[in-house]
Image (tube, grey):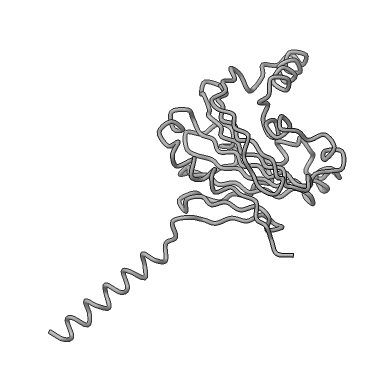
């Protein structure tokens, strides 16, 4: 009986260690260690470089792409069974993209709350109208159609940092995609940190509380010194 109890105790201990070895979240910090967030461990991490090329339009071997790589950090997470950076804009499963930009002198002089709203996708009325006009001038149908604003919140931040959190819908192809974007300008006006969470509107409604927890974990870190 003593030996049996010993084996049972060892088995229970092994199971507890196994459970402890599976973290609930993946904790993420940017390259400079100034921005922090967490995502559920069930998300797969992706190389976000193709997203940077898509958003910037830069040729991968251009000087512009090289300079962007030096001042932009980014990462992406996908909960799809087949993770792909192509799910940034259209996916039935949650996708998280986060980026930190070291602003140029020109950007520092012009950044505004609307600039934070429009940092990745056209959100403010003026930029949406400009986007539609450019699509019409090129003779192509706009990728983003039928914008619907769900919420717009100016973030209350300490030490002079500023931020916005916007939630909105866009019809992309046949699907309506919901996006939740948090964008923060640091207190020195030098960096913009952005998190974009997206999935189809039905998915978003069902899992809004989970996405709130991810978005609320997105914060600036104050490092010593």
Foreground residue among 24 and 64: 24
Q: Quadrant of the N terminus?
A: bottom left
Residue 162 in sight here:
yes
Picture mark count: 0
Q: Report the residue at 70% width, 57% height from top.
A: 31
Q: Report the residue at 72% width, 43% height from top.
A: 185
The image quadrant that residue 104 belongs to is top right
Q: x, y percentage for residue 221?
A: 65, 55
Q: x, y percentage for residue 161?
A: 70, 45
Up the image or down, 224 lies above or below 108; here it is below
Up the image or down, 193 lies above or below 138; here it is below
Q: In which quarter of the image is the C terminus?
A: bottom right
Q: Report the residue at 64% width, 44% height from top.
A: 157
Residue 172 in sight here:
no
Q: x, y percentage for residue 115?
A: 73, 32
The image quadrant that residue 184 belongs to is top right
Q: Residue furthest left?
A: 1
Lateral position of residue 210 relative to residue 177, left or right: left
Up the image or down, 81 lies above or below 171; here it is below
Q: x, y percentage for residue 95?
A: 54, 40
Lateral position of residue 15 relative to residue 73, left or right: left
Lateral position of residue 79 relative to residue 16, left or right: right
């Amino acid at each position: 009986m003593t030996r049996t109890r010993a084996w049972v105790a060892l088995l229970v201990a092994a199971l507890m260690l196994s459970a402890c070895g599976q973290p609930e979240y993946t904790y993420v910090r940017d390259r400079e260690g100034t921005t922090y967030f967490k995502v559920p461990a069930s998300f797969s991490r992706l190389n976000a470089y193709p997203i940077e090329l898509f958003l910037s339009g830069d040729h991968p071997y251009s000087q512009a792409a090289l300079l962007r790589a030096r001042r932009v950090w980014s990462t992406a997470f996908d909960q799809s069974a087949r993770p792909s950076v192509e799910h940034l804009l259209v996916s039935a499963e949650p996708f998280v993209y986060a980026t930190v930009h070291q602003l140029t002198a020109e950007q520092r002089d012009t950044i505004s709350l609307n600039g934070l709203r429009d940092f990745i996708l056209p959100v403010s009325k003026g930029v949406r109208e400009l986007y539609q006009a450019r699509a019409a001038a090129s003779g192509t149908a706009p990728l983003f159609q039928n914008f619907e604003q769900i919420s717009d919140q100016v973030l209350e931040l300490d030490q002079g940092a500023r931020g916005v959190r916007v939630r909105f819908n866009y019809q992309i192809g046949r699907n309506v995609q919901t996006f939740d974007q948090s964008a923060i300008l640091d207190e020195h006006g030098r960096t913009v940190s952005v998190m974009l969470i997206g999935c189809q509107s039905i998915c978003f409604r069902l899992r809004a509380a989970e996405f709130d927890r991810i978005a609320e974990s997105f914060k600036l870190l104050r490092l010593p010194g």
